């Protein structure tokens, strides 16, 4: 879906561990990070991802809603959060726009 | 012995006494003679009857009665009545043999030691010789004094008399020895008997002197000494039955104390209390109760320590306490108590009752604890299952619906696309998203994700946010509150909010939750119409859930309005 709109998927990872490796290798512009990963919570992965791939925009995505995570979501310090039902190119654009330009 | 038997015996004793006195001395004597004759006999029979009625299993009472009748038998020894006088003369003094038997046996049936039995046999021989000689040697003029004419008979009787008195003295010594080597409890019982026996021994030692004067081996005692001494001796005789009676009644006393022991134990049966109560009741300070421990395969003492296998000995008797073939305990007690089997078996019954009671109590509290734990496990398992279903809904159905919606949206193209197919696809995408919302609602009802993901505080916050009635919230929760306690508190609040929305018509809700002293307290008050039904299925289910996790639940809802739902749950 995203590929249709000026985004290119350059890598995919099924677990947190491979995500870290892939991000370090590919240095993507944007990381869409699912909260519900099999090996660890996406919320805990934001910080190591930042170290592995500085400069990447990290957007958390989840089938749950932002409110379900309470204070843990802001504490994760991601660049944005998208409920998977809201995951459209426009919504992603909004998140990127809300983020202060580098 | 029952009163129905004792009464007639008493009447017979009175008449028999009067008859023997009439035959023996008539009534023209100085008053002290009938007074002594009748007095001593009646005291013997009377004490015996009282003892036999009070303590029917104790032979001493019946033996005293027998001694009393034998006393009367000797009275007409000088009577000029054919056969009666002969028999009286022959059997005079036999009551003493019975008294010695009582004194050496009490509180048992027969003397326990060989030397005591030997003395008894020797005395019996003396009495037999005396009686036989007197029967044979008595002359035809019935005066009794004609025995003096038969030198051999006279000597035999006199020497038997001396031997008898000496044997009595030895018997008195044996009684004193018995007292000295007895346990404390036994001393209490035989003390009065032993004292009387010792007094008689002294009196008998003096009496041995009299036949010596008859044999002209010792100077005669002047009358002004002999008469007062005879009085003293007779008074001492009265002491014997009274001493025995006191001993018998003390046996009786210890038995009724069992009732007190039951009362003492009843309230708070513990090993120590039971032991003390029973030791008091049995008057045996040495008493020990060793309880059988199946796991240990041995006995434990009152303090719970392992006790060596108890064995009966000269200083302690071991009595088992069993219940339907299973061993519970043993009583290790003073052998003095062996003489009173009824008392010991009452003690055994009290012990059995107390130990059984204690075991049942422990069993019940153990089972209760098991039930409580299993209820808590059921609640926990239910929570875990709800969490699993919620996660499955999110990760399964919901994910697929989301993917479906996205695919439909993509296929539908831009909103500007006016093709019918495009519109239908976009409607399909909207439907799929609506289904996602419904699945989310369903999942939240099963187990709110926010509770798992963020904890109780945001979960309560989310509840308040969704509430149609304004909520005033005051939360003071430890951050680590989670698991069953958190889920329970959440469901209490959730049910309360649902009820408020449906029934209360409230303008304001106040929610307070706090953790303190290992407990979580949650309280939801509204200012609505009140009258909530605590027995309704929702609140009933909550009450069950709260008590299953070991907490307390309350609904206060007066007709005047307002409802308060509160729960206190222990933290895991």
Image: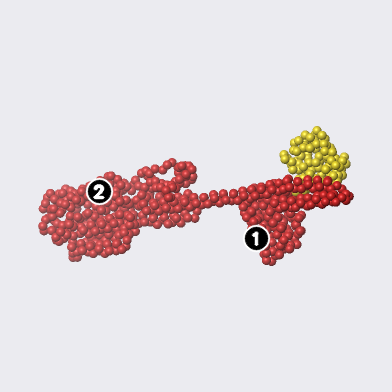
Rendering quarter of residue A92: top right
Secondary element type, mark 2 = helix
Front-most of B34 and B555?
B555
Letter of the chain in yellow: A
From the image, state whether disc 2 or disc 1 is nearer to you: 1
User: The numbered mark 1 sits on a residue in which chain?
Assistant: B
Disc 2 crowd, CA 10 A, few/some/many (<14, 14-19, 20+):
many
Position of B115 with respect to A30 (left or right) is: left
The residue beneath circle 2 is B120
Outermost top residue: A25
User: x, y percentage for residue B338?
Assistant: 36, 49
Secondary element type, mark 1 = loop
In the rendered structure, the colour chosen for chain B is red
User: x, y percentage for residue B12?
Assistant: 25, 63
Outermost front residue: B420
Q: Which mark is residue B536?
A: 1
* Residue B335 vertical position relative to residue B10 in the rendered view, above or below: above
């Amino acid at each position: 879906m995203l590929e249709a709109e000026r985004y290119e998927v350059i890598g995919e990872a099924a677990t947190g561990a491979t995500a870290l490796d892939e991000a370090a290798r590919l240095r993507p512009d944007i990381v869409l990070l699912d909260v519900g990963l099999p090996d660890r919570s996406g919320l805990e992965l934001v910080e190591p991802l930042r170290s592995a791939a500085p400069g990447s925009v990290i957007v958390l995505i989840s089938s749950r809603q932002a409110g379900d995570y309470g204070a843990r979501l802001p504490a994760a310090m991601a660049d944005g959060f998208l409920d998977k039902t809201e995951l459209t190119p426009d919504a992603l654009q909004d998140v990127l726009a809300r983020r202060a330009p580098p | 012995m029952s009163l129905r038997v004792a009464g007639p015996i008493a009447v017979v004793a009175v008449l028999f006494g009067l008859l023997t006195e009439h035959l023996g001395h008539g009534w023209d004597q100085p008053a002290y003679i009938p007074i002594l004759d009748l007095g001593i006999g009646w005291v013997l029979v009377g004490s015996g009857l009282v003892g036999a009625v009070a303590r029917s299993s104790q032979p001493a009472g019946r033996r005293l009665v027998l001694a009393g009748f034998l006393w009367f038998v000797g009275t007409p020894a000088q009577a000029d009545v054919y056969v009666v006088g002969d028999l009286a003369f022959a059997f005079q003094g036999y009551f003493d043999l019975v008294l010695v038997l009582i004194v050496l046996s009490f509180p048992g049936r027969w003397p326990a030691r060989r030397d005591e039995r030997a003395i008894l046999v020797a005395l019996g021989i003396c009495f037999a010789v005396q009686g036989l000689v007197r029967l044979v040697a008595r002359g035809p003029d019935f005066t009794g004094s004609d025995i003096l004419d038969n030198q051999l008979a006279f000597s035999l009787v006199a020497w038997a008399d001396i031997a008898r008195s000496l044997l009595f003295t030895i018997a008195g010594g044996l009684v004193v020895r018995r007292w000295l080597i007895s346990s404390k409890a036994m001393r209490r019982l035989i003390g009065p008997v032993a004292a009387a026996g010792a007094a008689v021994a002294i009196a008998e030692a003096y009496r041995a002197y009299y036949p010596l004067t008859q044999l002209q081996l010792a100077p005669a005692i002047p009358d002004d000494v002999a008469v007062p001494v005879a009085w003293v001796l007779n008074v001492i005789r009265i002491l014997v039955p009274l001493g025995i009676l006191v001993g018998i009644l003390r046996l009786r006393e210890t038995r009724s104390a069992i009732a007190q022991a039951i009362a003492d134990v009843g309230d708070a049966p513990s090993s120590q209390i039971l032991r003390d109560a029973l030791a008091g009741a049995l008057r045996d300070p040495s008493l020990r109760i060793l309880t059988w421990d199946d796991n240990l395969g041995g006995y434990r003492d009152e303090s719970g320590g392992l006790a060596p296998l108890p064995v009966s000995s000269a200083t302690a008797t071991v009595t088992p306490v069993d219940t339907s073939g299973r061993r519970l305990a043993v009583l290790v007690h003073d052998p003095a108590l062996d003489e009173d089997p009824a008392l010991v078996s009452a003690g055994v019954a009290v012990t059995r009752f107390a130990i059984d009671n204690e075991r049942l109590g422990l069993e019940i509290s153990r089972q209760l604890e098991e039930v409580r734990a299993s209820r808590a496990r059921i609640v926990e398992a239910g929570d875990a299952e709800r969490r699993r279903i919620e996660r499955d809904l999110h990760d399964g159905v919901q994910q697929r619906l989301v993917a479906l919606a996205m695919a439909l949206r993509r296929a539908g193209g831009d909103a500007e696309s006016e093709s019918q197919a495009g519109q239908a696809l976009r409607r399909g995408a909207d439907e799929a998203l609506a289904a996602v919302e419904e699945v989310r609602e369903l999942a939240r009802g099963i187990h709110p994700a926010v509770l798992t993901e963020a904890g109780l505080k945001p979960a309560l916050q989310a509840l308040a946010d969704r509430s149609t009635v304004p909520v005033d919230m005051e939360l003071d929760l430890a951050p680590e509150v989670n698991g069953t306690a958190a889920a329970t508190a959440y469901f209490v609040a959730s049910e309360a909010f649902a009820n408020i929305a449906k029934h209360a018509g409230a303008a304001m809700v106040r929610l307070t939750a706090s953790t303190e002293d290992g407990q979580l307290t949650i309280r939801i008050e509204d200012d609505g119409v009140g009258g909530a039904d605590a027995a309704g299925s929702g609140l009933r289910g909550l009450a069950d859930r709260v008590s299953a996790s070991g907490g307390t639940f309350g609904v206060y809802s007066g007709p005047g309005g307002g409802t308060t739902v509160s729960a206190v749950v222990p933290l895991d």
